[in-house]
Image (cartoon, rainbow, N blue to C red):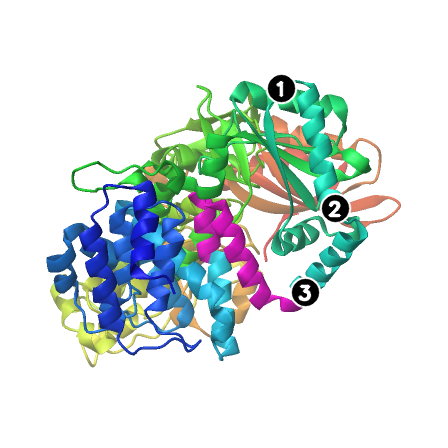
Amino acid sequence: MIRQFELVERIKAYDPNVEEDALNRAYVFAMKAHGSQVRASGDPYFSHPLEVAGILTGYRLDGSSIITALLHDTVEDTLATLDEIESLFGEEVAKLVDGVTKLSLIELQSDHAKQAENFRKLLLAMSDDIRVLMVKLADRLHNMRTLNFLKNPAKRLRIATETMEIYAPLAERIGMQEMKNELDDLAFAEINADARNSIMKRLDFLRNQGEGLVERIQNELRRTLAAASIHAVVNGREKTAYSIWRKMKHKDVEFEQLSDIMAFRIIVDSVDDCYRTLGVMHNAYRVVPGRFKDYISTPKPNGYQSLHTGIYGPERHRIEIQIRTQDMHDVAENGVAAHWQYKQGGETRAREGRQYRWLRELLDILEHASGPEEFLEHTKLEMFQDQVFCFTPKGDIRNLPQGATPVDFAYAVHSEVGDTCVGAKINGRMMPLRTRLKNGDQVEILTSKAQKPSPTWERFVVTGKARARIRRFIRLKERDQYLELGKAMLTRAFKEEGYEATDKALKGVLRIFQRETTDDLTAEVGMGNITSREVLEAVYPGTKKKSAKVVPLAPVRVRHERNAQQAKNAIPVRGLIPGMAVHYAGCCHPLPGDRIVGIITTGKGVTIHTIDCEKLEALADQPERWIDVSWDMDRGELDGSHVSRVFLTVLNMPGTLSDLSTVIAKNTGNISNLKIVNRSADFFDLMIDIEVKDVTHLAEIMAALRASPVVNTIERARG
C-alpha cells in the first residue's frame, strides 16, 4: 500500500505547486472514513482509493483529481456526505466526487438497464469535466486487477463484460491506449479464459523458439535508420492476447496464419523524420500491401497520430511498424492526460471534455433516445466500430464507423441535414442513400425542406446518432398519426349515435381505461388497443349497439359510388405515413381512386385494403374491425408514387421483357419488382409491381400493356 508521504512526493515530482495540505487531509479523511472496511481480497478497503490515486499520478493528473480518487467511494460506502466533502475540500472536488460516485440509488428492472442508466449519468457528469471519466477509468482498472478475488462467477463475468463494452472503448476514445489495452486483456481473461491461455501458451512457445528475436529485429532496424542518418528510438513488443484473438476472429484465421503478432515502434524527432523513416523502411524492406495508414495527416478522433505500415522485415518476419514523434507517442499512450492543462495559482477548472466531438454526439444521442437501454445500444454502436474518414465538399473531415452510409454522414454534419436528406453525391456521382462509404470519399448531401426522416433508413444506418434521431422521429410521428386517426374514429362513432366526442366527455372515462390524458386515450383508439365503441359505451352507458353492416365483398357489387352519408362518415387517409398509423395491404396494393376499407389491427392502427380484396372474406364475421375510409382526393396530398401489382401472361420470345418495360416507361410508370411465376415453352406468367400515381394511371398502363402483341392476359392483384 502506498504510504502518505510517497503519494505526495509522486505528485510534487511533476507539480511542485500542488496543495500538499489538502492531499494530506484527504488521505487521512478517506482512511478514517473507510475505517475497518475490507475488500474481497482481505485488504483494507482504503487500499482501493489509494491505488486509484496512484494510477492517476502515473498520468500526472492535478491535485484535485488525486484528492477525488482518494475520496471517490466515501459518499456511497461510508457515513461521509457530499456537503462535508465540499466544506473540507471545496466545491470543485465535491462536484468531481459526485460525478464519480457509483450511482446505485436508481432502481430499475434489470442489471442491464441499471448499467445503461449509470453510463448515461457518467456521460452527463464527464461532459462538464473529463477528469470524472479519468478517475472512473482508474477506479475500474484497479477493480479489474483485483477481479479474481470475487467469488461470484456471474458477477465477475458481468463486470468484465461491462469493462470490455463500455470502459475500454471510452479509454480508447480519450486516447488512453495503454489503459485500454490492459482493461481489454483483463476482461478477456475473465470472459474467455481458455482462449487467452491458449494464445499465451503459443506466444511462450514462439518466444522460446525464436529466443532474442525481438531484440535482433530492433537492432537491425536501428542500424538501417542510422545508415540513413535518422536519430530514432526503436522499441519492439508482442501484441496483447486480446488483440491477437480479435484479429483472429475478424480475419477468420488460425493463430498460425497470423504473421504480424509483433509490433515495433519508431520514435523520431520531427514530423519530417516520420515520413523520411517511412521511406527508408519501404526502401529497405518489402511492403505488405494494404497495410499503410497515415494518421498524422488524418488523426483519429481521439487525437492519435502515427504512421502505420507492414513490412517483411529483418529475418523475413512480417511485422507492423508505427512511426511517430515523442509528443505523438505521449498522446497515443496517455491521451488527454498527455496534454493536461490546469491554471497555475488559481482555481483549477478543467473543461477538457468539451473539445471532444464524439462526447457531444453521445450527449445528442442521449437527448433523443427513448430510454437508458436504447441509449446504451446506440452508444455501443457509436464507440465500438472501426472508422472510415470522409470529406465534405469544403474539405472538412468526418470520421464514421465502418459500413456508414450517406445518411450517417448527413447526421454527422448536422442533425437538421440528416432530417432533410433526400440524396447524396459520392465523389461527384449520385448514389443511393444506402451506399456504404469508403475511406477518402467526398460526400455531398442534397436536402429538401419538405423531406422528413424515413422509417426505412433505420434498416441501413450504423451510427448511434442517426438511429436515435430516426427512432425519435418515428416515435413522435407515430403518436401524431395514431392521435389523428383516433380522433377521426371517435368523432365518427359518437356522431353515428347523435353525440359529440368532446374533451370533457373523454376526461370522464380516463380512470376506466387507466389513461392519464385524453390524448393518451385517443392514441390508443387509433392504435386499435381500445375500440371507439368501447369509449362511446363508457361515456354513455346503455347505448344500444346498432347492428353492424358488413361491407359487401363481391367485386360486382362494390363498384357503385359511395352515397352521401358514407362519404360524410368516411375517415380520410391524408397525411398519414405508410408504415406508421396506416399500412397499405401487400395483398391487394390499394391505390388512390380505389374503393377502400380499413381493418383495425390491435397495436398497429389501420390496414387499408381494396374493398374487393379476397383476404377480406376471412374478416366478414368481425364487422367491429371494419371502418370506412376515403382517399380525400381534393386535398392534393396524394402526389407521389404508390405500388400496384399486376399479373401477366406473355409470349415466351426474345424481346418480351424489353417491350413490357418500354410500354410501362412510356406511360410514366416505374417497375419496382418483377418475378417470373411460371414458365413454359410458349408463355411466361409474370408478377410485376409498378409505381403509379393512382388507379386511373394504372388503368392507362394496363390498357397499353393489353394492346401489346406480346401480352396474352393481364389482371390486377386482388389478394
Q: Residues within 10 Å of mark 1 (few under 14, many from 20)?
A: some
Residue type at numbered disc 3: Asn
Q: Which mark is residue 197?
A: 3
The furthest residue to the right: 681
Q: Earlier in the sequence, mark 2 or mark 1?
A: 2
**Residue drawn at (50%, 48%) of the image:** 178
| Residue receiving disc 2 | 212
In the displayed structure, does residue 131 sit left or right of residue 158? left
Residue type at numbered disc 1: Arg
Residue 596 at x, y percent in the picture: 45, 54
Magenta highlight range:
166-194
In the image shown, does 346 or 82 lie closer to the viewer? 346
Residue type at numbered disc 2: Gly
Q: Residues within 10 Å of mark 3 (few under 14, many from 20)?
A: few
- Is residue 689 placed above or below 90 in the rendered structure? above
**Residue drawn at (20%, 68%) of the image:** 516
The quadrant where residue 313 appears:
top right
Which numbered disc, 3 or 2, marks the residue closer to the eye?
A: 2
| Residue receiving disc 1 | 276
